[in-house]
Amino acid sequence: MDDIALRVENLSKAYPLYQKKGTKNIFSLGAWSNILRNRKDHFWALQNINFEVKKGEVLGIIGPNGAGKSTLLKILARITEPTRGRIEIQGRVQALLEVGTGFHPELTGRENIFLNGAMLGMRQQEIRQKFEEIVDFSGVSAFIDTPVKYYSSGMYVRLAFSVAAHLDADILILDEVFAVGDQGFQRKAIDKLERINQYKEKALIIVSHNLGTIKRLCNRGLLIINGKIMAVGEQDSIISIYLNNIDKKDKINDFFSLKDKSRKGNQNITFTSLNFHNHIDNFKKTIQSGQELSIEIKYTLNMKVDAVKDIKLSIGILNNWGQPLGQCPVFFLLGQKN
């Protein structure tokens, strides 16, 4: 195990679902094992998880909500006990699962650095040595002696992440920490993580729904769906498997049908469908950043070609929140009426 930082073998986690009609769902921790033995109504958050993380490796864990990713990290961080299975760890483990956990609103930023650092496993001497670096990275030096209850939410999470980013650990576990701060600070946080692992001495385990960040930082991927490992391997291939799984579950053909008759316009040209093509698959709803993409728009021309003039069309690209990311022009090739 000289080059293995962490090994997980046959790891499973079950949560009992025990409820008697007309009573509250209350039972002692000691009763859990009896419930699991005697009842069938329990939920397996994780089932037979097996993987290894080598020193210097950055493992990205991806999957849909409720897949068991955060449960796995809590077990690795020794916050939650597994139902069965074992974990071998070589070195010091630190986990950042909830940014800002342990911050006290009445204490100043300076005091919270020492408090939060101690809760994360840093020694007092270590915190003092890294104090100026932590403050400088957070960008809140002007308010470091102000109680954090007066901080904006962005200042709060920047300071919390800065403390965690300076942990001296052999294995660093991160859960959705890239949503902190503004875009500038997010880039700064990613750059920091890249520097942490530049000498390939530490192991990083990262969970994030930001596939672009996972692709940039991680060299191996692990896909979890419904508490089970669906695939482990090179990061790009794991992301492709995940996106393909999403495609299969979505009603793609219905989604891209453009046969709605209530659209505005003079109906001289009617769009009927929209398809995506790339160099890998004939048809996809979802593609990865950097892949080639062709957009096929089908239409019906309800007038003579000679009468068509000054057609202008552009395709807008929006993010999940409906915010515009860019536009591109579309050129028409008009032929016979379909």
Image: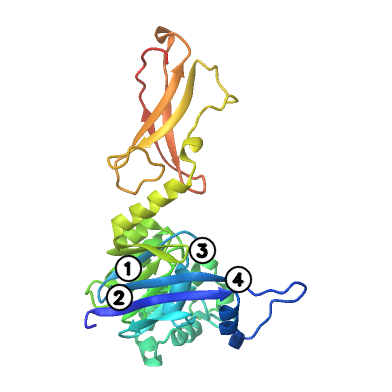
Asked if labels 2 and 4 touch by Cβ distance under 8 angstroms, the answer is no
Please report the residue visible at 47 percent of the width from the left and 24 percent of the height from the top. Answer: 271
Q: Is residue 163 visible?
A: no
Give how far apart the Cα atoms at labels 2 and 1 are.
8 Å
Report the residue marked by disc 3: 66
Report the residue marked by disc 1: 59
Whole-percent x and y of residue 160? Answer: 46, 75
Instruction: Give 151 or 168, whichever is nearer the viewer.
Output: 168
Give how far apart the Cα atoms at labels 4 and 2 are.
37 Å
Report the residue marked by disc 2: 203
Q: Nearer the viewer, mark 4 or mark 3?
A: 4
Q: Nearer the viewer, mark 4 or mark 1?
A: 4
Dot 4 amino acid type: Asp
Instruction: Give 38 or 155, whichever is nearer the viewer.
Output: 38
Residue 214 occupies quadrant: bottom left
Instruction: Give 236 or 28, whichever is nearer the viewer.
Output: 28
Dot 3 amino acid type: Gly
* First reached walking from the N terminus: tag 4 or tag 3: 4
Asked if labels 1 and 4 touch by Cβ distance under 8 angstroms, the answer is no
